[in-house]
Amino acid sequence: MNIDKIINKLNIELNVMQQATVDALLNGKDDIVLLSPTGSGKTLSYLLPLSQLVDASSDEVQAVVVVPGRELALQSANVLKDMGSGLRGMACYGGRPTMDEHRKLREVKPQIVFATPGRLNDHLDKFNILSDNIKYLVLDEFDKCLEMGFHDEMQSLISKLPSDVRSILLSATPAEELKDQKIINNNFTTLNFLPDSEQVPDRVHIYKVESPDKDKLETLRQLLLTFGSQSSIVFLNFRDSVERTAEFLRDAGFSISYFHGGMEQKQREDALYKFSNGSANVFVSTDLASRGLDIPNIDNIVHYHIPESEDGYIHRVGRTARWDKMGRSFFILNSLEHVPEYVDAEVDSYEIPEELPKPALPKMSTIYIGKGKKDKISKGDIVGFLCKNAGLKKDEIGKIDVQERFAYAAVARQKLQVVLKLTSGEKIKGVKTIVEEVR
């Protein structure tokens, strides 16, 4: 499928950065460094030209996309799938047996693999992925890969690939240290779309909120109450702080998800899914959620803990005001804290009113369905099941995600109990299944 058809299918228009990247990859041969703000659409900027450069008739891996975490691997693979280009993709990452992924690789025969550095090295070492036919290497969020200590793994990975592989490096911030890692050389062309002076988009309004107590939880509670049902991310610097804050907010009546690197993979996926499909209004996380998560329409970013660096601040705020949307960023400060000097914007004071509403309930709830791709279940099957058995209308069904052995679906919160009652013990495509709420 040509690029124009893919663009029409996705119902989008390419921005200036995306058009320039597509042109550079299709009409040139140089390696590329693409610097562009978070939320500007870098994933599509390289996948669109790859859809024309990769041979869909071959069963060999021809492009590898290296990412810092499993969430970005999964999301990027989903972008390729949504394009409908005819190419097969697969996400590979730690936290599950390499042998299981090898079986899946043989089954899917992907032309593009999205992988974390360690897992990709593992597959290359075991010849589960053959490097001979790899023509394109994409390093997405390469600065984050280096921050996370992947230097040696990146060097090892590059040494296993053909010497003429074409490299495409993407980041939302410049990373000068790459030149010392011998990853960038004189063959690279830099496409720099980072603004000269605009640290964060001017569509983001920045506020400070004064906390009378050193422990800022009560101020956070009051602040979130002023947001109503808006979608908000609360950033903290430590895993235990995330869990403590999440427990406090849940006890206070908020619908929340929380997220950090110490959680099991399925816990993280559940939390992310609940927030992205509207089943939770508040997402409490470490900076792990500041990159690689493509969640649209986030209204508010709350810095419960001050970001540890300017780059960390930029990436946090980059979760809101994506594309042409508006957003807000809030610093909660106790008497010993102040807005960091690196914040290059006007910061207004935000006054919390004395009378506050109760926590707003989310519009959706998430259900677990105990059948998936292995059972030949599709999104259409689930829509039919929920409409026929539970009496839902299509506008009462939200995001559906079908995994290998199970599926998630978002349903209107007011209809949750009815759905659970009417689907209990029922069959989907002739097979009984479990339907449960994801809490």
Image (cartoon, grey):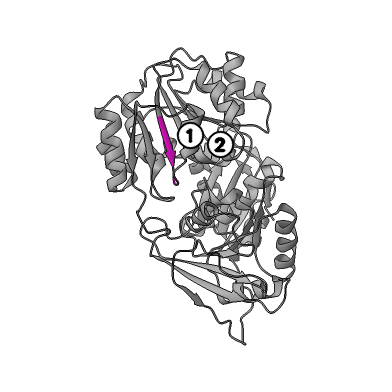
Which residues lie in the magenta part? 168-173
Quadrant the C terminus occupies: bottom right
Please identify, in this view, whether the residue under mark 2 or under mark 1 is nearer the observer.
1
Q: Which residue is mark 2?
A: 146
Marks 1 and 2: in contact by CB < 8 Å? yes
Question: Picture coordinates of residue 156 (x, y %)?
Answer: 57, 21
Q: Residue at x 62, y 35 (%)?
A: 149
Left or right: residue 304 versus residue 34 is right
- Determine whether 169 is above or below 306 in the image: above
* Vertical comparison of 58 with 350: above or below: above
Q: Judge by depth and name the residue closer to the eye, 368 or 251.
A: 251
**Where in the figure is residue 434, as x and y percent of width and height?**
69, 45
Relative to 129, residue 153 above or below: below
- Label 1 secondary element: helix
The answer to whether residue 68 is visible is no
Q: Secondary structure at mark 2?
A: helix
On screen, residue 386 versus residue 183, left or right, reads right
Question: Magenta-highlighted stretch: main secondary structure?
Answer: strand
Q: Position of residue 342 (x, y in %)?
A: 50, 61
Residue 285 quadrant: bottom right
Q: Could you classify mark 1 by the number of other residues whose Cα lies within 10 Å: few (under 14), some (14-19), or many (20 or more)? A: some
Compare residues 191 and 84 and report the one nearer the observer: 191
Q: Amino acid at mark 2?
A: Leu
Residue found 42% across the figure and 20% down from its top: 62
Q: What residue do we see at 44% from left, 71% from top?
A: 346
**Residue position marked by numbered label 1 in the rendering:** 178
